[in-house]
Amino acid sequence: MEHQPNNPLHGLRLDTILEQLVAHYGWEELGERITIRCFTHDPSIKSSLKFLRKTPWARERVEGLYLKMLRDTKKNL
């Protein structure tokens, strides 16, 4: 595996990213920030992962929100 020091997503699994987003925002706010059905109607990690793995545009939005969360967290320290 290639070392990528400037890529905060390198080595992170999608389930880890999603779990951290849910812990930080909660399902309700996550569904408001990224309006996709798997976040707004009976959300679960399993159903969300299934959708995100099949839908590149949705995965990109989730990864983008994760990066924003990391930036905002660093700013507040």
Image: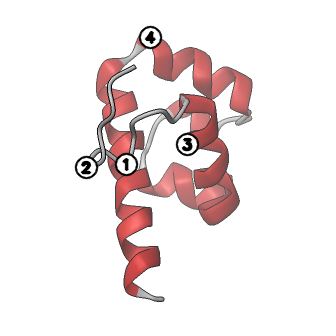
Q: Is 65 situated above or below 40?
A: below
Mark 4, residue position = 54
User: Of callouts 3 and 4, which one flags the residue occurring earlier in the amino acid sequence?
Assistant: 3
In space, the residues marked 3 and 4 are separated at their CA atoms by 16 Å
Which amino acid type corresponds to the residue marked 1 in the rendered image? Answer: Pro
Which residue sits at x=58%, y=53%?
Answer: 21
Q: Is 77 situated above or below 71?
A: below
Q: Is 61 situated above or below 48?
A: below
Pick the residue in front: 62 or 32: 62
Q: How is the image coloured?
A: secondary structure
Mark 2, residue position = 6
Which residue sits at x=70%, y=36%?
Answer: 43
SS label for mark 3: helix
SS label for mark 4: helix
Residue 15 found in image quarter:
top right
Find residue 17 and name its label.
3
Which amino acid type corresponds to the residue marked 4 in the rendered image? Answer: Lys
User: Of callouts 3 and 1, which one flags the residue occurring earlier in the amino acid sequence?
Assistant: 1
Pick the residue in front: 22 or 16: 16
